[in-house]
Image: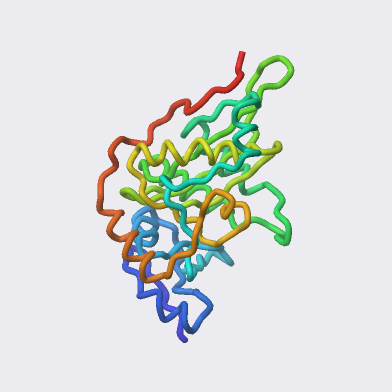
């Protein structure tokens, strides 16, 4: 299968289904990560996975792991941590640091991160445009000063949220951020969270697999719907903070 090249300024994408069937999900390539291109890609179920020699590779995955926010499951152990641990969870408090830390964190089986400088710049621009959001978990040190312990970021288009990456510099920090963020996203009107690939970590929160056609139909529909309330900067929760 020939891999389509997307010229600069043309933000149309090919149908991802042939790529899922014939090319392990590689839909197309481009030489840019322009904001309009990113906004066009996600509702179709397409996302940029990595860059090589200035070329960006756009993929689709099937089946798709998704989480419906109103159906989130918080296990007994995490519920206890949420009640007893000292932490604060914020939204959009430090997007640049969250994406930078996600790019630096060591991950089993990966020699390097796909979140290179061009990715960080593109998603920071998407954040400034109001379509990329970060959730931060902060732990207090011995002097009560809050330090960034974990978090995640993703892309929001209409009532769909597309998770991108998370990190935990301290135990349970990304879980706490996610557990506090999902109900907040539901309050804002988010109806579906794209988790991309199914993992044990996300399955514990209640993620489930969705056939690609159903996923794309849902995200295209939800991307055209307005939120009930904007995802603004602020504090979501402070627990045992003195």
Q: In this image, 19 relative to 111: left or right? A: left
Which quadrant of the view contains residue 107? Answer: bottom right
Q: Residue at x 43, y 45 (%)?
A: 132
Foreground pick, 54 / 84: 84
Which percent across, then down, holds residue 175? 60, 41
Q: Residue at x 47, y 26 (%)?
A: 235
Most extreme residue toward the bottom, as rendered?
Answer: 1
Foreground pick, 210 / 124: 210
- Against 4, residue 155 (above or below) is above
- Against 175, residue 201 (above or below) is below
Foreground pick, 41 / 66: 66
Q: Residue at x 36, y 65 (%)?
A: 216
- Against 232, residue 104 (above or below) is below
> What sort of colour scheme is used for the picture?
rainbow
Which percent across, then down, holds residue 238? 54, 23
Which percent across, then down, holds residue 176? 59, 36
Q: Which image quarter is the C terminus in?
A: top right
Q: Residue at x 49, y 64 (%)?
A: 209
Which percent across, then down, holds residue 28? 44, 73
Q: How many numbered callouts?
A: 0
Foreground pick, 9 / 148: 148
């Amino acid at each position: 299968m020939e891999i389509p090249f997307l010229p600069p300024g043309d933000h149309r994408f090919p149908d991802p289904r042939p790529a899922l069937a014939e090319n392990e999900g590689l839909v197309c390539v481009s030489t840019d990560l322009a904001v309009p291109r990113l906004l066009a890609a996600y509702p179709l179920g397409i996302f940029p996975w990595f860059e090589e020699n200035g070329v960006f590779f756009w993929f689709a995955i099937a089946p798709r792991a998704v989480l419906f926010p109103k159906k989130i499951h918080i296990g007994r152990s995490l519920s206890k941590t949420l009640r007893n641990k000292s932490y604060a969870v914020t939204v959009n408090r430090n997007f640049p640091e969250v994406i930078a830390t996600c790019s630096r964190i060591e991950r089993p089986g990966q020699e390097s991160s796909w979140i290179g400088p061009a990715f960080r710049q593109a998603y920071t621009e998407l954040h400034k445009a109001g379509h990329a959001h970060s959730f931060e978990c902060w732990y207090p040190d011995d002097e009560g000063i809050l330090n960034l312990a974990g978090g995640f970021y993703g892309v929001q288009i209409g009532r769909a949220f597309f998770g991108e990456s998370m990190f935990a510099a301290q135990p349970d920090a990304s879980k706490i951020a996610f557990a506090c963020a999902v109900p907040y996203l539901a309050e804002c009107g988010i109806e579906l969270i794209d988790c991309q690939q199914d993992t044990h970590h996300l399955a514990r929160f209640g993620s489930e697999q969705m056939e690609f056609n159903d996923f794309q139909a849902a995200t295209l529909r939800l991307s055209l719907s307005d939120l009930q309330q904007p995802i603004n900067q602020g504090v979501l929760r402070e627990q045992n903070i003195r």
